[in-house]
Image: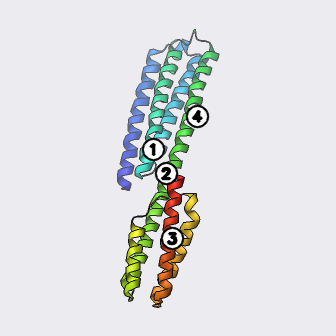
Amino acid sequence: MKNIKTKGALGISLIYAVVIGIYNLLVFTISNGDARNNVFWFSYGFVMLAFAVQIVCMLLAFKKADVEAVFFGIPLASFSIFYLGAAIFAGTVFMIFAGIVPPVLAIVVQTVLVGAFIVIAAVTVLSRDVTQHVADNVKQNVVNLKNVLIDVELARDSAENAELKKALAKLCETVKYSDPISTEAVAAVEEKILSRVDDLKMKVAVSDAEGAMLVCRELEYLYAERNKKLSASK
């Protein structure tokens, strides 16, 4: 995997090097040396900045291997390509007409392009991070749910009392089909569930069937409360 990433990075670097090299060749071959005034160099600098920004954005967009991170990194990569295209167009036009374009106009237009892209990129990155955080929470909640289900199933399998075994089987179904999504509204309930599952395991281990039955009923109630609060918060 590391070799693949290294080869991919080298391949992308080579592509950018070729594109930048060709652009520079065209710019300095076509342009007249006498016309390379402040407007020309300002514009050239903004174009090179756009290339650098685009490279950094591509790296940031696909830095993580997670599917969610890559998917939500696509808008950032797309915006950076649009910005690069706009910067090349504007910068090239200003370089061609460097002798007649007011320096203030060239600087203002290209600064606005940079500023607009920074705002869009910041919003995109924040949105991606929030979405990734939610996705990570969902994954963790699914893991916790599976762990609770495993604990209850183990308790069911080890229970000797027939009535308790039946109650634990019903609890297994409740846990299995509960909503894996979690919000702040159910955080306190989920803490109680984890605590009561620990109690359940302990009571089953010491063959306290009556105590385990009480915990089963509490857990059924807690899951019902959790599901209702989740429904209300959606």
Q: Which residue is mark 1?
A: 72
Of badges 1 and 3, nearer the viewer stands: 3
In the rendered structure, find residue 221 and report the number of the disc placed on it.
3
Query: Who is closer to the viewer here, 32 or 135?
Result: 135
Residue neighbourhood size for the residue with mark 3, other residues' Cα within 10 Å, grouped as few (<14), some (14–19), many (≥20): few
> Residue 30 appears in which quarter of the rendering?
top left
The answer to which of marks 4 and 1 sits earlier in the sequence is: 1
Of badges 3 and 2, nearer the viewer stands: 3
Q: Which residue is mark 2?
A: 132
Of badges 4 and 3, nearer the viewer stands: 3
Query: Who is closer to the viewer here, 69 or 199?
Result: 199
Pointers 3 and 2 in contact (C-beta within 8 Å): no
Left or right for 226, reference 12: right
Quadrant of the image for the N terminus? bottom left
Per the model, the C-alpha gap separating discs 3 and 2 is: 32 Å
The answer to which of marks 2 and 4 sits earlier in the sequence is: 4
Question: At 52% across and 40% down in the image, what residue appears?
Answer: 124
Pointers 2 and 4 in contact (C-beta within 8 Å): no
Residue neighbourhood size for the residue with mark 4, other residues' Cα within 10 Å, grouped as few (<14), some (14–19), many (≥20): few
Pointers 1 and 3 in contact (C-beta within 8 Å): no
Q: Which residue is mark 4?
A: 119
Does residue 228 lie above or below 196 as drawn?
A: above
Kind of element beneath mark 4: helix
The answer to which of marks 3 and 2 sits earlier in the sequence is: 2
Does residue 19 lie above or below 177 as drawn?
A: above
* Mark 2: amino acid: Gln
* Mark 4: amino acid: Val
Kind of element beneath mark 2: helix
